[in-house]
């Protein structure tokens, strides 16, 4: 390809709304352009790199025994209603209407479509196992699209879906995909590592995410260098000890705490109650109903864990008004004792109870973090503004509905597997594999007849890779002050030939054309910078776009019978003209 023939609109400065380095470089190197927030055009070079990522994914999926299909982006809502996700995934669904007023959903993923297909086309154990994949546009109504391709409203995903007759079979399919993902990211030059993950709205019971370490990543991962344990913070647990009981079993005592509304304030003079002897009571609205969540004063609630453990779909913190409608007090004085407003009397109390009943807030579950199990000598809000209760024994005094691990782990806590201190780092999720079980096959009737003639639901798995996000993660990991540093495997062009004189009859240009033909014949992707520009401009652009190898043909070195070869990440070498192509080929193997 000749530079002047294609379109590489490099920029000196990135637009102000590009915050992270990879987003800036995607724009500056002329790889993508924004049409609207979260919606991008791929320019020729960006598309070439994207196609290379896709090719690697296809090869590895094919090798793992998956077969490619292409499903529609327009999906009828009925199948989403059948799976139950019309509601649970409603916040990300793009809904469009046709001219007859009929509604459609734009595919954010395709479990419903593939399961419908399997329901119609697969009938016997003889047809199983099967794994179908596609690489296609996906649409998600992200509230905050940001960081370019990282969180877009429209993006390319590879999604695969496996169907097996047994759980063991499904596990084997999962393992194949897990291994394929490891190969895919390695071939893309990415340092990605698998972590245990929450299953979210997709459902299922077993899942890993593939994470690329990056300060700008939207995920936090807890990991142990000693034993290799690694989990998304939304899922991670630690071996931290429970709070434990102290000796005393004294009766609850109410005491005045005027103006005290934080854990910290209660831990100071004159109260001096350490955060680890306090119970933090949070009111949440889970699927429209209030719930109480109890967590130790020095711990943080993990909302994803809470949703996963209780099966709640829509979870949010209650407003101060909802807190007082539920418990009769404002945040800062809330507790799971005195739930019937016992401190009030007569009409006031009756009215409060009446309002609560009217709102449907009068029955609520109490979920407590396991770290509080067995704890006594605790302090908690009295459900009366300006008062707290001490000598609280959680199991004696509070009717806990269920105990779960609900807290967020912190760095330095002992690893749940080996006890060594955990570390926490930020990371980008590039892929996600799920063992789904029979959730979708049961709801959408994807069944088969087994050897004995019994009808059973297929055991499914699903496996996603954010293809466009992966492309950007490669840049987030591979860059320097001058621009992108591509791995050879996905670079838009592997070699950039830069003649410093571009007149067709010049020696530099003739030689450039010759190298171009010879390298192309060896299946190297080459671009020839035929622009009539100053050398500085050409070199800067080549570094910005990040071609792994550059060959410069300048008058001075040509006069000595040499050309200049520079790996993007290495030093300039002067090489005799007649061995230049070999030298590039050798480098192309090495870089
Ligand atoms: P996230 O937690 O980042 O929102 P997700 O867990 O909802 O992602 P999945 O449903 O697991 O995403 O989708 C599979 C893959 O698609 C993800 O691992 C990610 O790489 C990619 N992906 C998801 N949402 C987006 C998006 N808005 N823009 C670009 N890629 C995305
Ligand atoms: Mg995910």
Image (cartoon, rainbow, N blue to C red):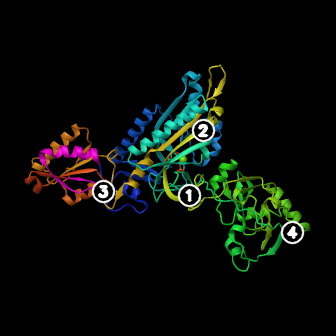
Q: How far, Cα to Cα, is label 2 from label 4? A: 49 Å
Question: How far from the left and from the top, in percent, is residue 267?
Answer: 69, 74
- Mark in front: 3 vs 2: 2
Question: How far from the left and from the top, in percent, is residue 483?
Answer: 32, 58
| Residue 577 within the magenta-colored segment of the rendering | yes
Q: How far, Cα to Cα, is label 2 from label 1? A: 32 Å
| Residue 323 within the magenta-colored segment of the rendering | no
Above or below: residue 334 compared with residue 157: below
> In the image, is 6 to the left or to the right of 372?
left
Q: Residues within 10 Å of mark 2 (few under 14, many from 20)?
A: many
Q: Residues within 10 Å of mark 3 (few under 14, many from 20)?
A: many
Q: Quadrant of the N terminus?
A: top left
Cβ of mark 3 under 8 A from ligand 1: no
Question: How far from the left and from the top, in percent, is residue 379?
Answer: 76, 68
Which residues fall within the magenta stretch? 565-591
Mark toward the start of the polypeptide (4 vs 1): 4
The residue wearing badge 2 is: 436
Q: Residues within 10 Å of mark 4 (few under 14, many from 20)?
A: few
- Mark in front: 2 vs 4: 2
Judging from the image, what secondary structure is the residue with disc 1 in? loop
Judging from the image, what secondary structure is the residue with disc 3 in? helix
> In the image, is 111 to the left or to the right of 385?
left
The residue wearing badge 3 is: 544
**Residue 470 appears anywhere in the view:** yes
The residue wearing badge 1 is: 420
Q: How far, Cα to Cα, is label 3 from label 4? A: 70 Å
Outermost residue on the right side: it is 346
Q: Residue at x 21, y 46 (%)?
A: 584
- Mark in front: 1 vs 3: 1
């Amino acid at each position: 390809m000749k530079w002047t023939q294609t379109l590489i609109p490099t920029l000196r400065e990135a637009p102000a709304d590009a915050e992270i380095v990879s987003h800036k470089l995607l724009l500056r190197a002329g790889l993508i352009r924004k049409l609207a927030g979260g919606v991008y055009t791929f320019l020729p070079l960006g598309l070439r790199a994207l196609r290379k990522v896709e090719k690697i994914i296809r090869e590895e999926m094919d090798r793992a025994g998956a077969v490619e299909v292409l499903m529609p982006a327009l999906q009828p809502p009925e199948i989403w209603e059948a799976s139950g996700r019309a509601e649970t995934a409603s916040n990300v669904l793009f809904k469009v209407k046709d001219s007859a007023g009929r509604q459609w959903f734009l595919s954010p993923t395709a479990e419903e479509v593939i399961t419908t297909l399997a329901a119609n086309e697969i009938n016997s154990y003889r047809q199983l196992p099967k794994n179908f994949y596609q690489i296609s546009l996906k649409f998600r109504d992200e509230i905050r699209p940001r960081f370019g391709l990282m969180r877009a409203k429209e993006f390319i995903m590879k999604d695969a879906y496996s169907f097996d007759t047994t759980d063991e079979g499904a596990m084997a399919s999962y393992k194949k995909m897990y291994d394929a993902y490891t190969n895919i990211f390695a071939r893309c030059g990415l340092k990605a590592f698998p972590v245990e993950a929450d299953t979210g709205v997709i459902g299922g019971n077993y899942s890993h995410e593939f994470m690329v370490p990056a300060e700008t990543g939207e995920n936090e991962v807890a990991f142990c260098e000693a034993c290799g344990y690694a989990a998304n913070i939304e899922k991670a647990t630690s071996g931290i000890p429970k709070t434990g009981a102290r000796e005393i079993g004294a009766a609850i005592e109410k005491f005045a705490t005027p103006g005290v509304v934080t854990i910290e304030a209660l831990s100071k003079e004159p109260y001096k109650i350490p955060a680890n002897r306090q119970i933090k009571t949070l009111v949440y609205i889970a699927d429209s109903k209030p719930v109480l969540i109890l967590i130790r004063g020095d711990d943080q609630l993990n909302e994803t864990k809470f949703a996963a453990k209780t099966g709640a779909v829509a979870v949010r913190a209650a407003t101060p008004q909802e807190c007082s409608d539920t418990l009769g007090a404002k945040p800062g004085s809330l507790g799971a004792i005195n739930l019937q407003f016992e401190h009030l009397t007569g009409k006031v109390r009756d009215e409060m109870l009446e309002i609560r009943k009217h709102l449907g807030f009068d029955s609520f579950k109490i979920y407590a973090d396991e770290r509080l199990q067995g704890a006594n000598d605790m302090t908690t809000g009295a459900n009366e503004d300006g008062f707290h209760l001490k000598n609280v024994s959680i199991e004696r005094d509070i009717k806990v509905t269920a105990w779960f691990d609900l807290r967020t782990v912190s760095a330095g806590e002992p690893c749940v597997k080996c006890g060594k201190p955990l570390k926490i780092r930020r990371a980008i999720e590039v892929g996600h594999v799920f063992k789904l079980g029979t959730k979708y096959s049961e709801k959408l009737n994807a069944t088969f007849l087994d050897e004995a003639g019994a009808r059973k639901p297929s055991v499914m798995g699903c496996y996603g890779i954010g293809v466009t996000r992966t492309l950007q993660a490669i840049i987030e990991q591979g860059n320097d002050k001058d621009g992108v540093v591509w791995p050879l495997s996905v670079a838009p062009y592997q070699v950039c030939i830069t003649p410093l004189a571009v007149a067709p009859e010049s020696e530099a240009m003739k030689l450039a054309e010759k190298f171009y033909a010879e390298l192309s014949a060896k299946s190297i992707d080459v671009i020839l910078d035929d622009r009539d520009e100053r050398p500085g401009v050409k070199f800067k652009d080549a570094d910005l776009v990040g071609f792994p190898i550059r060959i410069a043909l300048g008058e001075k070195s040509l006069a000595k019978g040499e050309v200049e070869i520079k790996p993007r990440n290495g030093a300039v070498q002067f090489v005799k003209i007649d061995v230049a192509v070999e030298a590039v080929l050798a480098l192309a193997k090495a870089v």
